[in-house]
Image (tube, grey):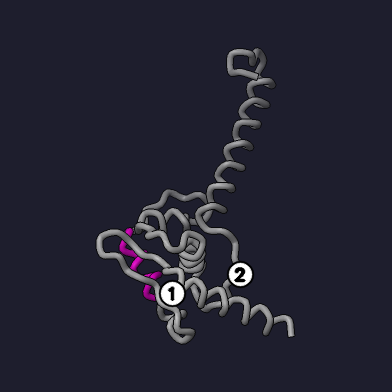
């Protein structure tokens, strides 16, 4: 149904509701592409966990600060007024949580951060190990 075909208010409301539902689904799919839901059992804030998921999903690509911020949007759809420097703080906490497991996040000066393939393999082994411990 095109916008011009809507003749009554009820048809317009139904058309807009359908458009809204499509947009919400597209946003959900894009969020999943940015940071898929992998189970990570580390003492990190939700935003840092989302950033780690994005690094994991896109390894070995370098993700910019902006991409990492997009992977962890503010709650409730609020306007994002965070300082991009907050990414460095979250990366600090991610590195601190991963260091005891011998896993490192790489910094690419002026470009962003990445999880090299060797580090992704270590993280995957760690995650599999924690899953098997949780089930026993």
Which quarter shows the N terminus? top right
Q: Where is mark 1, residue-wise?
A: 94
Q: Residue at x 65, y 31 (%)?
A: 18
Q: Where is residue 77 in the image (x, y as percent from the top left)?
A: 50, 49
Q: Residue at x 48, y 84 (%)?
A: 101
Crowdedness of circle 1 by 10 Å Cα count: few (<14), some, many (20+)? Answer: many
Residue 90 or residue 55, whichever sits in front: 55
How many angstroms separate mark 1 from mark 2 (CA)? 15 Å
The answer to whether 133 is drawn above or below residue 87 in the figure is: below
Question: Residue furthest toward the left?
Answer: 110
Q: Where is residue 109 in the image (x, y as percent from the top left)?
A: 26, 64
Magenta part of the protein: which range? Answer: 84-94
What secondary structure predominates along the stretch shown in magenta?
A: helix
Tell how many labels: 2
Label 2 element class: loop
Question: Residue furthest toward the right?
Answer: 136
Question: Residue 135: which quarter of the image?
Answer: bottom right
Badge number at residue 39 = 2
Q: Position of residue 131 (x, y in %)?
A: 66, 78
Residue 89 located left or right of residue 128 = left
Question: Residue 6: which quarter of the image?
Answer: top right
Label 1 element class: helix
């Amino acid at each position: 149904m095109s916008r011009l075909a809507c003749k009554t208010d009820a048809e317009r409301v139904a058309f807009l509701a359908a458009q809204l539902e499509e947009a919400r689904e597209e946003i959900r799919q894009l969020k999943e592409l940015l940071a898929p839901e992998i189970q990570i059992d580390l003492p990190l804030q939700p935003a840092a966990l989302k950033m780690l998921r994005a690094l994991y999903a896109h390894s070995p690509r370098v993700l910019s600060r902006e991409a990492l911020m997009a992977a962890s949007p503010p709650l409730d759809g609020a306007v994002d007024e965070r300082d991009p420097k907050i990414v460095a703080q979250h990366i600090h906490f991610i590195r601190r949580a991963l260091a005891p497991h011998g896993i490192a996040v790489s910094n690419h000066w002026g470009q962003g951060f990445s999880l090299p393939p060797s580090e992704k393999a270590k993280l995957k082994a760690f995650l599999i190990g924690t899953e098997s411990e949780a089930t026993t």
